Image (tube, grey):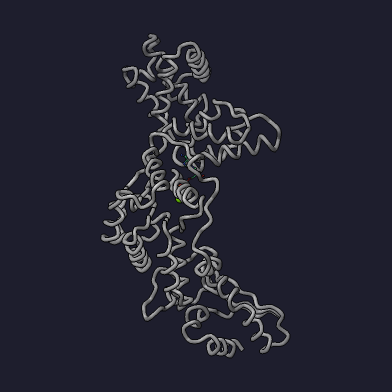
């Protein structure tokens, strides 16, 4: 029955479409009134379900009238036939293979359909210039973004290439540019991730609408492509992007691109594309500083309306150092928790609520590292960390090292004591108390300790 159905589908949809989408279906178990068809990827499963699901059901029903359901499933590795490689799923367009389809794309029926829909992706209304907190690490990128939003296509700012690590605000700035420009509705802006660009391009090939796709792209005033590094190794899409890019720049339109690296470090992108990307303004968003993290947290806490003590903000800014998204996520969780239980945000509550996040961010500072840094700082011998000498000049740094060991590692008091010349846990406890008191009384000393902590944490 399956062979007949497959043959029927093939004659209905045509050879190319059949090979592209349906050839890889494998007949799975037939169980009473239900038949299961297996597909190698979720992408194919979703696509086949949405495009051919009804027709498949009807044909099955004609073959076996008792059949009530056709179930489409993704093959588990075990039942994947050797012949059905992802390669075969790759569509053929104008005699040239589009080799850019990744192995297992996310669930994506809507992505393919997007190809026909409007180019103007929705911009996140929260990502504005006003909500972007400016500090040393991002002030240059911010200024460039503002400039492009005020005067697109100014010489020297086209293309604008923003780059930096994950969660440092690239997407935020791009959306801010987009929102600013579209506010008055005179400028048309297309924003999309490079990944989406690829799916749209492939979708256009499949639905034989590449010309429309190109025309649409080339009709915008501002084109923004986010996370360009995604195009590494996707040669056909890269080429398409390159042509679009040139057409737009030649027509005096603005391009904004983001990536995780500078153009020259994006090895894997074609040279001519890298060269052109570096031709306008290249702006780096640096890793956040403690000060910037505090400012961001303050801004978000204020916006939330929930009072968050400065100590908690400092604690978070110390602990979560790499990614603003995670920093924000942690704060949001605290705020949600406070709202939900009607309890104020405290340091203790923070440690409890964020237990899992904090654990993942625990930089594994070792006690040895702490001892080394502290003895360097006060210019004493490392061996004095474990010696029996009681002179203030060595005893005080030793106490600071114990204090930092307690603060920065998850070691218990007895464990810490052992690392300091087999001292007793009460000695460690005493050191922690003593340093805490001193820090409250003596600001110069407190600054020293804070500085050490920061050095150890970064
Ligand atoms: P990227 O695109 O660089 O990975 P995003 O722009 O998505 O990073 O930023 C991650 C999150 O952090 C977003 O919610 C964004 O609003 C926030 N964020 C990043 N930098 C800042 C900043 N300087 N001020 C305010 N929010 C920021
Ligand atoms: Mg981003």
Picture quarter with the C terminus = top left
Viewer-nearest residue: 127 or 391? 127
Pinpoint residue 264: horizontal percent, then vertical percent: 28, 52
- Locate residue 242 relative to residue 32 in the image: left or right: left
In terms of image quadrants, where is residue 87? Answer: bottom left
Residue at the spot 60% in from the left edge and 73% down from the top edge: 50
Task: State whether residue 311 is above or below residue 52.
Answer: above
In terms of image quadrants, where is residue 418? Answer: top left
In terms of image quadrants, where is residue 142? Answer: top left
Viewer-nearest residue: 278 or 178? 178
- Locate residue 287 relative to residue 110 in the image: left or right: left
Residue 358 visible in rendering: yes
Viewer-nearest residue: 314 or 133? 133
Residue furthest top as drawn: 391
Pinpoint residue 23: horizontal percent, then vertical percent: 50, 81
Residue at the spot 53% in from the left edge and 34% down from the top edge: 299
Task: State whether residue 277 is above or below residue 9.
Answer: above
Viewer-nearest residue: 306 or 141? 141
Pinpoint residue 286: horizontal percent, then vertical percent: 37, 40
Pinpoint residue 212: horizontal percent, then vertical percent: 45, 72
Picture quarter with the N terminus = bottom right
Residue 77 visible in rendering: no
């Amino acid at each position: 029955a399956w062979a007949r159905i497959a043959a029927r589908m093939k004659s209905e949809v045509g050879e190319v479409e059949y090979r592209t989408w349906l050839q890889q279906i494998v007949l799975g178990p037939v169980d009473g009134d239900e038949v299961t068809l297996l597909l190698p990827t979720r992408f194919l499963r979703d696509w086949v379900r949405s495009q051919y699901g009804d027709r498949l059901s009807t044909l099955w029903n004609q073959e076996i009238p008792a059949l009530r359901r056709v179930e489409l499933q993704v093959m588990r590795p075990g039942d994947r036939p050797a012949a059905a490689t992802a390669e075969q799923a790759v569509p053929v367009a104008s005699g040239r293979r589009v080799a850019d389809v990744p192995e297992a794309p996310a669930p994506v029926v809507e992505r393919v359909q997007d190809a026909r829909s409007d180019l103007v992706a929705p911009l996140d209304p929260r990502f504005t210039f006003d909500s972007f907190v400016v500090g040393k690490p991002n002030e240059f990128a911010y200024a460039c973004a503002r400039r492009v939003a005020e005067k697109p296509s100014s010489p020297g700012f086209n293309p604008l290439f923003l780059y930096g690590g994950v969660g440092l605000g690239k997407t935020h700035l791009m959306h801010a540019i987009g929102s600013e420009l579209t506010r008055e509705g005179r400028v048309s802006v297309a924003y999309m991730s490079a990944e989406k660009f690829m799916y749209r391009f492939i979708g256009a090939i499949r639905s034989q609408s590449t010309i429309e796709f190109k025309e649409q792209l080339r009709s915008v005033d501002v084109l923004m492509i986010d996370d360009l590094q995604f195009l590494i190794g996707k040669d056909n899409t890269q080429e398409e992007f390159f042509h679009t890019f040139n057409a737009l720049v030649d027509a005096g339109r603005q391009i904004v691109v983001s990536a995780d690296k500078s153009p020259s470090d994006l090895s894997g992108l074609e040279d001519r594309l890298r060269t052109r990307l570096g031709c306008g303004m290249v702006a780096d968003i640096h890793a956040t500083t403690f000060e910037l993290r505090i400012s961001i947290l303050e801004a978000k806490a204020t916006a939330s309306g929930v009072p968050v003590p400065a100590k908690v903000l400092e604690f978070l800014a110390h602990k979560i150092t790499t990614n603003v998204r995670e920093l924000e996520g942690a704060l949001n969780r605290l705020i949600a928790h406070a709202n939900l239980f009607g309890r104020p945000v405290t340091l203790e509550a923070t440690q409890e609520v964020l237990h899992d996040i904090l654990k993942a961010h625990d930089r594994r500072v070792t006690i040895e590292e702490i001892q080394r840094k502290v003895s360097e700082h006060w210019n004493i011998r490392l061996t004095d960390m474990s010696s029996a000498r009681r002179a203030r000049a060595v005893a005080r740094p030793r106490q600071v090292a114990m204090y930092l060991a307690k603060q920065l590692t998850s070691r218990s008091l007895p464990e810490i004591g052992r690392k300091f010349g087999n001292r007793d846990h009460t000695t460690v406890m005493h050191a922690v108390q003593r340093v805490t008191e001193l820090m409250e009384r003596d600001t110069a000393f407190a600054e020293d300790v804070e500085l050490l902590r920061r050095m150890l944490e970064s």
